[in-house]
Image (cartoon, rainbow, N blue to C red):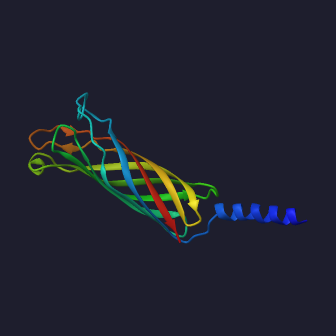
Amino acid sequence: MKKIIITVFAASSLLLYSTPSFAFSVSLGMPMGHTVTGKTNGVATHEDGYDAPSGFLIGVQLPFAMGLGIDSYKTKLKETEVKLGTDMYNIFYQLPIPVINLIFGLGFGNQALECTTCADDYDKGSATQWYTSIGFPILPLFDIHLSYRSITSKNINIKASDTKLDFSGSVTGVGFAFNF
């Protein structure tokens, strides 16, 4: 009888641990990699590659599984002093899965080339994204998550011509969430 009680207690503890019923969740992450796959006039937009981005990915989940987020990061273009600045505003939904936190979202915002002369040479371009994030609970109040963002940005305009640069690509990130 003692073994049955201990087994039921252990099983219910694991079940209750993996199905939290928290009202809010705050997520803070950082971008780890940025890959630009866009081509302008059939040529890669920047052939020398990109350094790791720096910035933040923030999300706040509301009690009804919907949430809002902000992404802001800069990615330095290798062999130059130019940075690609990205600012996005997101809305997301967390699927009601007990063991993992699976999120799907959409975002809109802008991208701009940033340097000492870029404001004179380039216009800001609009950007959209879809993204997904998968989180794993590590303690009852915390989880660690990985995210993937697919960005479409094909309209950073060169002021001296009618050419529009394509900085579409993807961003991967890692972060943690606090549930309360």
Residue at image position (75%, 62%) is 10
Percent coordinates x, y for residue 142 in the rendering: 53, 63
Q: Is residue 25 above or below residue 136?
A: below
Q: Determine the residue located farthest toward the top in the rendered image.
A: 42
Quadrant in the picture for residue 6: bottom right
Q: Is residue 97 above or below residue 141?
A: above
Q: Please state which of residues 41 and 15 is positioned toward the viewer in this rendering.
A: 15
Percent coordinates x, y for residue 154 in the rendering: 27, 41
Residue at image position (35%, 54%) is 108
Q: Please state which of residues 58 and 51 is positioned toward the viewer in this rendering.
A: 51
Q: Please state which of residues 68 and 8 is positioned toward the viewer in this rendering.
A: 8
Residue at image position (35%, 49%) is 128
Whether residue 88 is visible here, answered yes or no, is no
Whether residue 36 is visible here, answered yes or no, is yes
Percent coordinates x, y for residue 144 in the rendering: 50, 56
Q: Determine the residue located farthest toward the right in the rendered image.
A: 1
Judge from the rendering whether residue 45 lies leftward or rightward of residue 56; answer left or right.
left
Judge from the rendering whether residue 90 lies leftward or rightward of residue 162; answer left or right.
right
Residue at image position (43%, 52%) is 174
Judge from the rendering whether residue 125 lies leftward or rightward of residue 88; answer left or right.
left
Judge from the rendering whether residue 156 lies leftward or rightward of residue 17; answer left or right.
left
Question: Which image quarter holds the N terminus?
Answer: bottom right
Q: How many marks?
A: 0
Quadrant in the picture for residue 16: bottom right
Percent coordinates x, y for residue 35 in the rendering: 34, 39
Q: Determine the residue located farthest toward the front in the rendered image.
A: 2
